[in-house]
Structures are given as structure tokens and as C-alpha cells.
Image (cartoon, helix red, strand yellow):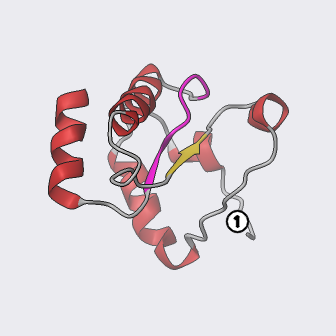
């Protein structure tokens, strides 16, 4: 996975990376992905290294790691986001993740 992430970094030159917070996810694949991103970005020189924001998704995330430093407002993309979540039903149900509650950020 590290090699694929490295190739994407070289191709895309992102100004920001948002990934999963390793060890604080609801799925082991997400933990592995976050860890691979951190490893791969860590091998870049400081000049090449974009900022990395890690997202924790766990029932006790606020108690475990504190309040978030960054909140991304996705209101304008909510329909697209919900459609994406519904497309991955084998991973989870949207209602299990978000419920039917709207959140104000």
C-alpha cells in the first residue's frame, strides 16, 4: 500500500492529505490505510511533505484523543456523500454511521 500512496503523492502533489487516524477507526482497513499514509508521508522531505489531517471514527473518540482541531463542512456535498456511503453497504449502513440526524458545524 505504501508504494501506491507514494505513486499518488508523486502524481498529484497534494497540498493537504486527509486520512484515517491510525488506531482510532471502526474498520481495520481504515487503520491500515491511515498508518500507510503516515509512514509514506513521513518519508518525504520536509519541503515536499503536505500537511496531514487525521480523522478519528470511534465511539469514544473525543474521550480518547480530545476535540477535533479541524472540522470540514460537507453540507454542500451531503447528497453525494450519502450516495457514496450507500454504495458501500458491505462496509456499513449509513444509518449506523450517521443516523438520520443533521449536524451543524
Vertical order, 24 against 74 (above or below): above
Vertical order, 93 against 76 (above or below): above
Q: Quadrant of residue 21?
A: top right
The answer to whether residue 1 is visible is: no
Q: Quadrant of the C terminus?
A: bottom right
Outermost bottom residue: 76
Q: Picture coordinates of residue 40 (x, y %)?
A: 33, 33
Nearer to us in this view, 42 or 20: 42
Residue 64 as seen in the image, left or right of residue 56? right
Outermost right residue: 63
Q: Is residue 82 magenta?
A: no
The residue sitting at 41% across, 55% down in the picture is 50
Q: Name the residue that disc number 1 marks.
A: 102
Nearer to us in this view, 57 or 48: 48
Instruction: Please state the extent of the stretch shown in magenta in the rendering.
Output: 17-24
Nearer to us in this view, 48 or 64: 48
Dot 1 lies on which element?
A: loop
The residue sitting at 44% across, 30% down in the picture is 30
Amino acid at each position: 500500500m505504501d508504494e501506491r500512496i507514494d505513486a499518488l503523492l508523486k502524481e498529484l502533489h497534494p497540498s493537504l492529505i486527509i486520512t484515517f487516524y491510525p488506531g482510532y477507526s471502526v474498520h481495520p482497513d481504515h487503520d491500515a490505510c491511515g498508518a500507510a499514509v503516515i509512514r509514506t508521508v513521513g518519508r518525504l522531505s520536509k519541503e515536499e511533505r503536505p500537511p496531514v489531517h487525521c480523522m478519528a471514527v470511534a465511539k469514544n473518540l473525543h474521550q480518547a484523543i480530545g476535540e477535533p482541531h479541524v472540522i470540514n463542512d460537507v453540507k454542500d456535498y451531503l447528497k453525494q456523500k450519502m450516495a457514496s456511503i450507500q454504495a458501500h453497504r458491505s462496509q456499513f449502513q449509513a444509518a449506523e454511521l450517521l443516523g438520520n440526524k443533521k449536524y451543524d458545524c
